[in-house]
Structures are given as structure tokens and as C-alpha cells.
Amino acid sequence: MTRRTTSFTLPILLLALLALPAAAFSLETVPFDSTNQSPLVAIFGLPGPGNFLPLASGRTEIGLNVGLSSNYTVNDNAREAIILDGETTRFTLTARHALSPRLDVGVKIPYLIQGGGFLDAFIESYHSTFGFPQGGRDQAPHNRLLYRYRKDGVVRMLMDSSNSGLGDLRLTAAYQLYEERENSRGLSLNLGLKLPTGDSDALRGSGGTDVSLGLTGGTDIGEAAGKWTAYGAAGALYLTKGDILPDQQKNWVGYGTLGVGWVPLPRLAFKIQADAHTSFYGDSDLKELADSSVQLIVGGAVGLGKETTLDIGVGEDLVVAASPDVVFYLNLRQNF
């Protein structure tokens, strides 16, 4: 898995670095702003890991997070059958502002484009070249959009038409419990509120309101050939009843993140991160619904200026079929 993701991201990071002038600043390791992009999970308010170091009081960060995900899984048993085949591009405008040295508040506004996409042939060729299993992808129609779940002979969920529009709005707040800036050490308490502003019929939202509460921490762990930082997050998500499989949806989900960052040069960082969560649905024997999920994100960050950073990452499903085959992340952040 690491070989596959690294082959995507390493050349991009190095080319971006070579194109930049010398910098007189050093990047801080910030977790990837990543979550499970499965069409049956991304509708909920699952938060990213958050940040363990605060913004300086009065400062503002504006960002644009782009996630391009490719889903393909087919599974069935005596009672159930599921097909998740399609692509989603999620553009998320983010903003957060430090009201005080310890408290910042923010908002995330997503816009989704869902359809058959264009990645199928590329992914199949890549799998074939490096000997990775196709998982049946090469037997399915190219660039198809079909999300369908059937249980006991009844179709419980179906989406087969391309669509685009706003998703569910998210409000965030972070309170700094501990900070030691010189060692990049910190611990923050993160609160999230997801509001049902997206169209649940088009899988741009769940139709419910979700609340998350978690801790995010990190610290420097060494200076061998650069600065090394470890970070992690853990929390719980409470979901009110939504419109998607409401009789199977759970009310509580646990989530967590572990990651390591390495900054070998002042304007270049590499990161590897694992995101996990418990299942969102019950009363199912299909791993697409019933299994906990673990995703691996490999990539890094390039400093485009003292206040501007570009994160680049590729995510893969360590628990197969519980999250998308592959997700490409770009996150441009600007501080003021």
C-alpha cells in the first residue's frame, strides 16, 4: 500500500519543491484534513483529526480542501446486496479564526460533484502495471455511477444520477488545553457541529445533525536528518436520526488518528497518517456497512510562502471496501 501511494505523491512534492525559491522559514507538521469519503459515510459529521497547535490570537486561516475519491465495491449475501461504483469530488472552503490565545472557531462549507468520473481506466492500468488486484473493477462498466443497497428484496438506497451542490455545513471550535510551541507540543479539545444543509436524496448530506468531541495532541520526537513529529487524535461522534438507512444507522461512532511527520528541509514535509472509525451502520453482514474502517494517507506538504502551505496526499483503504479504493487530497492553506 505504501509503495503505491508514495509513487503518486513523492514526484509531485519534489517537483513543487524544485520550482520554489529558497525559503527562510520552517514548516510545522499539521495533520492531513482527511476523513472517510465513502458515499455512505461522508454524509455524516465525521471530523478530521484537527490541529494540536493553535493559531496566534487574532489570526485567521483560510483554506481550500479538494478530495477526489474513487469508489468500487460489489458484495452480497443471502439477505443483502450492495454496489458502490462512482467518483466524488469534494471542494471544501474552510476558515478558522483565533478569538483568543486558546480558542479558535471555524466553518467548513463543502461543494460536491458526484458522477461516474474518469479514473477507472487509469486505476485499472496502474493496478495491472504493479500487480495489484483489480477486485472486479476491470469487469464493471467504466465511469459508471451506481450506489445501490438492497436488503430482504427491497432496495433501501439508490442513486444513479450525477449531481452537484452544497453539502452539509460544519461548524468547529478548538480550545487549547496545553501548548509548548518550541517543541511543537500541544493538546487541544475539538468540538464539531454538522448541520443538515445538503440534499440527502443526492447523498450530499445525511438529513441529520451530528456533534463530535475529541482530543488532538502532538509533539516533536527527534531531529535525525530533520525534525520528526508524532501526532494523534481520538473522539466520539453523536448522530441524530438521518434519512439514509435510518433503521440501521447507529447513534454513536468512535474515531481516531495516528500520524508521523518528517521535515527534512525548511519548506518540505513528508507525512504518513492512519485514520480509523467504528461502523456507522448495524443489522448488516456486509463489510461496506458493518466493518470499522482504517485509511492510510501518505504524502506531505510544500511551503509556498511563509504563510502559505500546500498539502498533497493519497489515501487508500486498509480495511478493503470500508472506504474508497483511492482518494487524492489537495489542501491549500493561507494564514493572515
Image (cartoon, grey):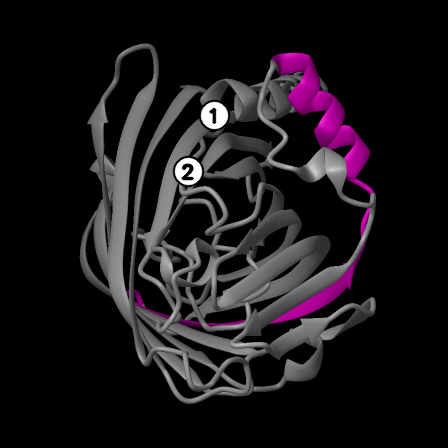
Expressed as whole percent of the image width and height from the top left, the position of residue 327 reads 60, 43
The label number, if any, that marks residue 318 in the structure image: 2
Q: Which residues are magenta?
A: 101-130
Image quarter of residue 210:
bottom left
Q: Is residue 196 above or below residue 20?
A: below
The amino acid on which the numbered mark 1 sits, given as a three-letter code, is Met
Residue 167 shows in the view: no
For the C terminus, the image quarter is bottom right
Give the residue type that dot 2 points to: Leu
The residue tagged with tag 1: helix, strand or loop?
Answer: loop
Tell me where residue 80 appears, x and y as whole percent: 51, 66
Residue 272 lies, in percent from the top left, at: 40, 31
Say whether marks 2 and 1 touch (CB < 8 Å).
yes
Q: Is residue 209 magenta?
A: no
| Of the pair 310 and 259, the residue shown nearer to us | 259
Label disc, if present, on residue 1 of the rendered structure: 1
- For image coordinates 83% across by 66% down, the residue present is 162
The quarter holding residue 150 reads: bottom right
Helix, strand or loop at mark 2: loop
Q: As drawn, is 78 to the left or to the right of 178?
A: right
Marks 2 and 1, the one that precedes in the sequence: 1
Q: Is residue 185 left or right of residue 332?
A: left
Q: Percent from the top left, x then y, of residue 4?
A: 55, 22
